[in-house]
Amino acid sequence: MVVTDRGDYTVKFRPHKEKDTFEIIMVAKQLDSTHRSFFSDEQGKIRADEQKEADEGSPVLKAD
């Protein structure tokens, strides 16, 4: 991923080669009720947070 700035969001991708896993995080430039941050990993669950950068402990928004 060359461009991480996606308008209202910044994208972060973190591969973990030793575990063969990854994390992808979309952080809103301004966090509020209409601009949440999102987190997902190889499990496919999408997690969201309105107050901070979302992580594996954030509430599940959607599970596949």
Image (spheres, rainbow, N blue to C red):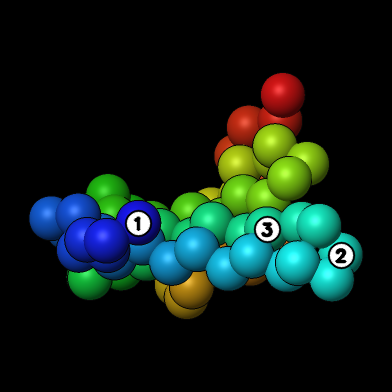
The kind of residue on which mark 1 rests is Met
Tell me the quarter of the picture where residue 30 sits: bottom left
Q: CA distance from mark 1 to mark 3?
A: 14 Å
Tell which residue pokes out farthest to the left in this image: 7
The kind of residue on which mark 3 rests is Phe
Q: Which residue is mark 2?
A: 19
The kind of residue on which mark 2 rests is Lys
x, y (%) of residue 42? 73, 45
Q: Indicate left or right for 18 with 23 as reference.
A: right
Q: Residue at x 70, y 37 (%)?
A: 44
x, y (%) of residue 52? 47, 75
Q: Residue at x 13, y 55 (%)?
A: 7
Q: Which residue is mark 3?
A: 22
Q: Residue at x 78, y 41 (%)?
A: 43
Badge 3 marks a residue whose secondary structure is strand
Tell which residue pokes out farthest to the right in this image: 19
Tag on residue 1? 1
Q: CA distance from mark 1 to mark 2?
A: 21 Å
x, y (%) of residue 51? 45, 72
